[in-house]
Image (cartoon, helix red, strand yellow):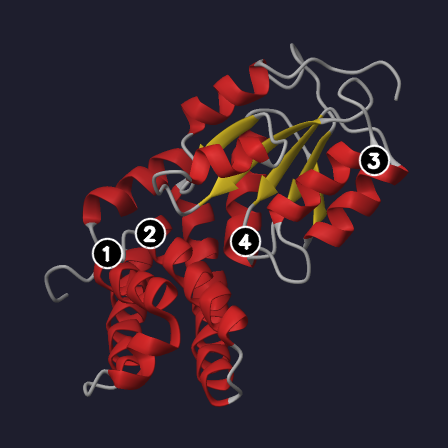
Protein backbone atom coordinates (compact mmCIF):
# COMPACT_ATOMS: atom_id res chain seq x y z
CA UNK A 1 0.00 0.00 0.00
CA UNK A 2 2.92 2.30 0.82
CA UNK A 3 4.18 2.35 -2.76
CA UNK A 4 0.73 2.72 -4.36
CA UNK A 5 -0.35 5.43 -1.96
CA UNK A 6 2.75 7.02 -0.39
CA UNK A 7 2.09 9.13 2.69
CA UNK A 8 4.07 11.17 5.17
CA UNK A 9 2.82 10.00 8.53
CA UNK A 10 3.27 11.38 12.03
CA UNK A 11 2.40 9.03 14.88
CA UNK A 12 1.60 10.90 18.10
CA UNK A 13 1.54 8.33 20.89
CA UNK A 14 3.19 8.27 24.32
CA UNK A 15 2.84 4.59 25.22
CA UNK A 16 5.80 2.47 24.09
CA UNK A 17 3.82 -0.73 23.45
CA UNK A 18 1.29 1.18 21.36
CA UNK A 19 4.07 2.99 19.50
CA UNK A 20 5.84 -0.23 18.59
CA UNK A 21 2.68 -2.01 17.51
CA UNK A 22 1.46 0.89 15.37
CA UNK A 23 4.89 1.27 13.72
CA UNK A 24 4.95 -2.47 13.05
CA UNK A 25 1.52 -2.50 11.43
CA UNK A 26 2.41 0.57 9.35
CA UNK A 27 5.70 -1.05 8.33
CA UNK A 28 3.85 -4.16 7.15
CA UNK A 29 1.71 -1.86 5.01
CA UNK A 30 4.83 -0.30 3.54
CA UNK A 31 4.84 2.89 5.61
CA UNK A 32 7.23 4.43 8.04
CA UNK A 33 6.24 7.18 10.44
CA UNK A 34 7.83 9.89 12.53
CA UNK A 35 7.07 9.83 16.24
CA UNK A 36 5.80 12.46 18.65
CA UNK A 37 5.28 11.45 22.27
CA UNK A 38 2.85 14.15 23.35
CA UNK A 39 0.60 16.85 21.92
CA UNK A 40 3.19 19.59 22.15
CA UNK A 41 5.67 17.58 20.10
CA UNK A 42 2.93 16.74 17.61
CA UNK A 43 2.07 20.41 17.01
CA UNK A 44 5.77 21.29 16.72
CA UNK A 45 6.36 18.50 14.21
CA UNK A 46 3.42 19.60 12.08
CA UNK A 47 4.86 23.12 12.05
CA UNK A 48 8.29 21.90 11.08
CA UNK A 49 7.51 19.40 8.38
CA UNK A 50 4.84 18.50 5.87
CA UNK A 51 2.75 15.51 6.88
CA UNK A 52 -0.20 14.06 5.05
CA UNK A 53 -1.70 12.55 8.15
CA UNK A 54 -1.30 12.56 11.92
CA UNK A 55 -2.34 9.42 13.80
CA UNK A 56 -3.21 11.05 17.10
CA UNK A 57 -3.55 9.27 20.41
CA UNK A 58 -6.14 11.06 22.52
CA UNK A 59 -4.67 10.44 26.00
CA UNK A 60 -1.17 11.90 26.16
CA UNK A 61 0.73 13.75 28.89
CA UNK A 62 1.39 17.52 28.82
CA UNK A 63 -0.95 18.21 25.89
CA UNK A 64 -3.54 15.61 24.96
CA UNK A 65 -4.64 14.72 21.46
CA UNK A 66 -7.79 16.84 21.61
CA UNK A 67 -5.88 20.00 22.50
CA UNK A 68 -3.22 19.21 19.92
CA UNK A 69 -5.89 18.82 17.23
CA UNK A 70 -7.52 22.11 18.25
CA UNK A 71 -4.13 23.82 18.12
CA UNK A 72 -3.27 22.42 14.68
CA UNK A 73 -6.67 23.44 13.30
CA UNK A 74 -6.33 26.92 14.80
CA UNK A 75 -2.87 27.47 13.34
CA UNK A 76 -3.37 26.05 9.87
CA UNK A 77 -6.29 26.08 7.46
CA UNK A 78 -8.05 22.94 6.30
CA UNK A 79 -5.89 22.71 3.18
CA UNK A 80 -2.68 23.63 4.96
CA UNK A 81 -2.78 20.97 7.61
CA UNK A 82 -2.52 17.19 7.65
CA UNK A 83 -5.58 15.04 8.09
CA UNK A 84 -5.90 14.08 11.74
CA UNK A 85 -7.00 10.58 12.69
CA UNK A 86 -7.82 10.02 16.35
CA UNK A 87 -6.74 6.79 18.00
CA UNK A 88 -8.35 5.98 21.29
CA UNK A 89 -8.70 3.06 23.66
CA UNK A 90 -11.94 4.46 25.03
CA UNK A 91 -14.60 3.46 22.53
CA UNK A 92 -17.18 5.16 24.68
CA UNK A 93 -20.34 6.85 23.51
CA UNK A 94 -19.65 10.44 22.60
CA UNK A 95 -15.93 9.85 22.27
CA UNK A 96 -15.98 9.97 18.50
CA UNK A 97 -18.04 13.18 18.55
CA UNK A 98 -15.58 14.76 20.98
CA UNK A 99 -12.68 14.00 18.62
CA UNK A 100 -14.51 15.32 15.58
CA UNK A 101 -15.54 18.44 17.52
CA UNK A 102 -11.87 19.06 18.32
CA UNK A 103 -11.21 19.16 14.58
CA UNK A 104 -10.10 15.60 13.92
CA UNK A 105 -11.16 14.07 10.63
CA UNK A 106 -11.46 10.40 11.46
CA UNK A 107 -11.47 8.07 14.44
CA UNK A 108 -9.90 4.67 15.13
CA UNK A 109 -10.25 2.55 18.24
CA UNK A 110 -7.37 0.69 19.84
CA UNK A 111 -6.26 -2.05 19.59
CA UNK A 112 -5.82 -0.96 15.99
CA UNK A 113 -7.46 -3.16 13.39
CA UNK A 114 -5.57 -3.36 10.13
CA UNK A 115 -8.68 -3.07 7.92
CA UNK A 116 -9.77 0.12 9.66
CA UNK A 117 -6.29 1.60 9.39
CA UNK A 118 -6.17 0.80 5.67
CA UNK A 119 -9.56 2.44 5.27
CA UNK A 120 -8.49 5.54 7.21
CA UNK A 121 -5.23 5.92 5.30
CA UNK A 122 -6.86 5.45 1.90
CA UNK A 123 -8.96 8.50 2.63
CA UNK A 124 -5.86 10.65 3.04
CA UNK A 125 -4.89 12.74 0.04
CA UNK A 126 -1.14 13.35 -0.21
CA UNK A 127 -0.48 17.09 -0.07
CA UNK A 128 1.85 18.72 -2.54
CA UNK A 129 2.73 21.75 -0.46
CA UNK A 130 1.78 23.35 2.79
CA UNK B 1 -2.46 -20.80 33.14
CA UNK B 2 -5.52 -19.65 35.15
CA UNK B 3 -8.67 -19.15 33.12
CA UNK B 4 -9.42 -15.64 32.03
CA UNK B 5 -5.92 -14.30 32.51
CA UNK B 6 -5.27 -14.05 28.78
CA UNK B 7 -7.94 -14.36 26.11
CA UNK B 8 -6.15 -16.74 23.76
CA UNK B 9 -8.24 -15.68 20.79
CA UNK B 10 -7.08 -12.07 21.13
CA UNK B 11 -3.48 -13.12 21.61
CA UNK B 12 -3.53 -15.41 18.55
CA UNK B 13 -5.12 -12.66 16.48
CA UNK B 14 -2.35 -10.29 17.53
CA UNK B 15 0.22 -12.85 16.37
CA UNK B 16 -1.51 -13.13 13.01
CA UNK B 17 -1.63 -9.35 12.69
CA UNK B 18 1.91 -8.50 13.74
CA UNK B 19 3.87 -11.77 13.49
CA UNK B 20 4.78 -14.20 16.29
CA UNK B 21 8.38 -13.02 16.67
CA UNK B 22 7.31 -9.41 16.85
CA UNK B 23 4.64 -10.20 19.44
CA UNK B 24 7.37 -11.85 21.54
CA UNK B 25 9.30 -8.58 21.47
CA UNK B 26 6.14 -6.63 22.22
CA UNK B 27 5.49 -8.83 25.26
CA UNK B 28 9.02 -8.05 26.47
CA UNK B 29 8.35 -4.34 26.05
CA UNK B 30 5.12 -4.64 28.01
CA UNK B 31 6.83 -6.61 30.78
CA UNK B 32 9.43 -3.85 31.03
CA UNK B 33 6.90 -0.99 30.97
CA UNK B 34 4.06 -2.37 33.10
CA UNK B 35 5.94 -2.43 36.44
CA UNK B 36 6.73 1.25 35.88
CA UNK B 37 3.05 1.90 35.27
CA UNK B 38 2.09 0.13 38.49
CA UNK B 39 4.67 2.16 40.39
CA UNK B 40 3.41 5.32 38.65
CA UNK B 41 -0.14 4.59 39.77
CA UNK B 42 1.02 4.20 43.35
CA UNK B 43 3.00 7.45 43.15
CA UNK B 44 0.09 9.31 41.57
CA UNK B 45 -2.22 8.05 44.32
CA UNK B 46 0.21 9.00 47.09
CA UNK B 47 0.97 12.34 45.45
CA UNK B 48 -2.70 13.11 44.86
CA UNK B 49 -2.19 13.51 41.11
CA UNK B 50 -5.60 12.50 39.79
CA UNK B 51 -4.92 13.36 36.18
CA UNK B 52 -1.78 11.27 36.04
CA UNK B 53 -3.54 8.43 37.83
CA UNK B 54 -6.27 8.31 35.20
CA UNK B 55 -3.82 8.58 32.33
CA UNK B 56 -1.60 5.74 33.56
CA UNK B 57 -4.63 3.55 34.29
CA UNK B 58 -5.81 4.29 30.76
CA UNK B 59 -2.45 3.25 29.27
CA UNK B 60 -2.42 0.04 31.27
CA UNK B 61 -5.97 -0.72 30.14
CA UNK B 62 -5.04 -0.09 26.53
CA UNK B 63 -1.99 -2.37 26.64
CA UNK B 64 -3.88 -5.09 28.53
CA UNK B 65 -6.55 -5.11 25.84
CA UNK B 66 -3.89 -5.44 23.15
CA UNK B 67 -2.66 -8.71 24.65
CA UNK B 68 -6.08 -10.01 25.63
CA UNK B 69 -5.46 -9.56 29.36
CA UNK B 70 -9.17 -9.11 29.93
CA UNK B 71 -9.31 -9.04 33.74
CA UNK B 72 -6.33 -6.71 34.07
CA UNK B 73 -7.90 -4.42 31.47
CA UNK B 74 -11.20 -4.38 33.38
CA UNK B 75 -9.44 -3.55 36.65
CA UNK B 76 -7.43 -0.77 35.01
CA UNK B 77 -10.56 0.58 33.36
CA UNK B 78 -12.30 0.65 36.70
CA UNK B 79 -9.45 2.73 38.15
CA UNK B 80 -9.42 4.99 35.10
CA UNK B 81 -13.13 5.75 35.33
CA UNK B 82 -13.42 5.70 39.11
CA UNK B 83 -10.13 7.47 39.81
CA UNK B 84 -9.12 8.00 43.41
CA UNK B 85 -12.67 7.30 44.53
CA UNK B 86 -12.32 3.63 43.65
CA UNK B 87 -8.68 3.35 44.61
CA UNK B 88 -9.17 4.80 48.10
CA UNK B 89 -12.54 3.62 49.29
CA UNK B 90 -12.40 0.02 48.19
CA UNK B 91 -11.44 -2.24 51.10
CA UNK B 92 -9.80 -4.77 48.84
CA UNK B 93 -6.98 -2.34 48.05
CA UNK B 94 -7.34 -2.26 44.27
CA UNK B 95 -3.72 -1.44 43.59
CA UNK B 96 -2.62 -4.67 45.30
CA UNK B 97 -5.28 -6.62 43.43
CA UNK B 98 -4.05 -5.00 40.23
CA UNK B 99 -0.45 -5.92 41.00
CA UNK B 100 -1.47 -9.52 41.72
CA UNK B 101 -3.37 -9.80 38.48
CA UNK B 102 -0.42 -8.29 36.64
CA UNK B 103 1.84 -11.01 38.10
CA UNK B 104 -0.51 -13.66 36.66
CA UNK B 105 -0.60 -11.88 33.31
CA UNK B 106 3.19 -11.56 33.17
CA UNK B 107 3.56 -15.28 33.85
CA UNK B 108 0.95 -16.22 31.25
CA UNK B 109 2.43 -13.94 28.58
CA UNK B 110 5.90 -15.31 29.23
CA UNK B 111 4.58 -18.84 28.67
CA UNK B 112 2.59 -17.89 25.58
CA UNK B 113 5.57 -16.11 24.08
CA UNK B 114 7.63 -19.31 24.32
CA UNK B 115 4.85 -21.56 23.05
Q: Nearer the viewer, mark 3 or mark 4?
A: 3
Task: Give the crowd class for mark 2: few <14, some 14-19, many >=20 residues within 10 Å.
Answer: many
Task: Give the crowd class for mark 1: few <14, some 14-19, many >=20 residues within 10 Å.
Answer: some
From the viewer's perspective, tell me whether residue A109 is left or right of residue A48: left
**Image point (14%, 59%), residue name:** B4
Helix, strand or loop for disc 2: helix
- Label for residue A59? 4
Q: Nearer the viewer, mark 1 or mark 4?
A: 4
Is residue B91 or residue A116 the one in the foreground?
Answer: B91
Q: On the image, which quarter does residue A61 sit in?
A: bottom right
Q: CA distance from mark 3 to mark 4?
A: 21 Å
- Residue B44 position (above or below residue A109): below
Is residue B114 or residue B77 the one in the foreground?
Answer: B77
Whether residues under marks 2 and 1 lie with C-beta atoms below 8 angstroms apart, the answer is yes
- Label for residue A75? 3
Q: CA distance from mark 2 to mark 1?
A: 6 Å
Q: CA distance from mark 3 to mark 1?
A: 41 Å
Task: Give the crowd class for mark 3: few <14, some 14-19, many >=20 residues within 10 Å.
Answer: few
Instruction: Provide the chain ID for the residue under circle 4.
Output: A
Q: Are marks 2 and 1 on the same chain?
A: yes
Amino acid sequence: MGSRHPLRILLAEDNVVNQKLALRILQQMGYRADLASNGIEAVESVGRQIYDVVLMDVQMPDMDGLDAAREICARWGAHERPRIVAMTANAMQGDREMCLAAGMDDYLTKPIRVERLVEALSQVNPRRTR
Amino acid sequence: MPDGTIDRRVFEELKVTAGADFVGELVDTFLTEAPNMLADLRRALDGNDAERFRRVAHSLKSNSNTFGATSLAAMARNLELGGFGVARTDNTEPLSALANEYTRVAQALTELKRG
